[in-house]
Amino acid sequence: MKISIACDDKYEAKKLANLIFIKDARETYITGILNVIKNELVVSLKDKSAHSVLLKDEDDVERFADFIQSVIDKEHKLVSTKILEHIVEIVKE
């Protein structure tokens, strides 16, 4: 299953891709969604830190939250992330 999430800009796209998935270890670092404020998403990571990511709009925040929830619940695993300008393509299995 694949999804494309539009971020506010290129920097936010890189930040999102790096926060949620580490390719070499094939590991998901995100452990939860702490808060949603309009187009801003606050996520928690395995190291107990919290990070904010600005997405394009509220629809992208909702689509990302729905998509990532099964990964957080360990029903699916992330396979890859790819950055295309301000878009992050995320694939889960």
Image: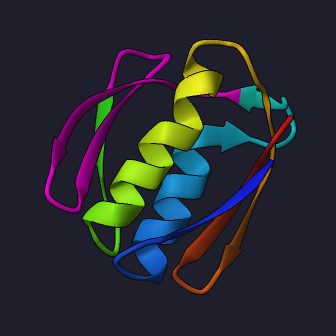
> Left or right of 4: which side holds 32?
left
Image position of 64 with respect to 25: above or below: below
Answer whether residue 45 is magenta in the image.
yes
**Residue 15, how many percent across, how many down?**
47, 59
Provide the major secondary structure of the magenta segment.
strand
> Left or right of 24: which side holds 55?
left
- The residues colored magenta run 28-49
**Residue 57, how many percent across, how many down?**
28, 71
Residue in the picture at 76% in, 24% down:
76
Residue in the picture at 64% in, 25% down:
71
| Location of residue 78 (image quadrant) | top right
Residue in the picture at 34% in, 77% down:
8
Numbered circles on residues, count: 0
**Residue 34, how many percent across, how many down?**
25, 27
Farthest residue, direction left: 37
Image position of 73 with respect to 52: above or below: above
The image quadrant where one finds the C terminus is top right
**Residue 68, how many percent across, how many down?**
56, 36
Residue in the picture at 68% in, 13% down:
74
Image position of 15 with respect to 62: above or below: below
Answer whether residue 74 is magenta in the image.
no
Q: Nearer the viewer, residue 2 or 22?
A: 2
Farthest residue, direction bottom: 85
> Left or right of 76: which side holds 13?
left
| Location of residue 47 (image quadrant) | top left
> Left or right of 79: which side holds 78?
left
Image position of 91 with respect to 24: above or below: below
Colouring scheme applied when the structure was drawn: rainbow
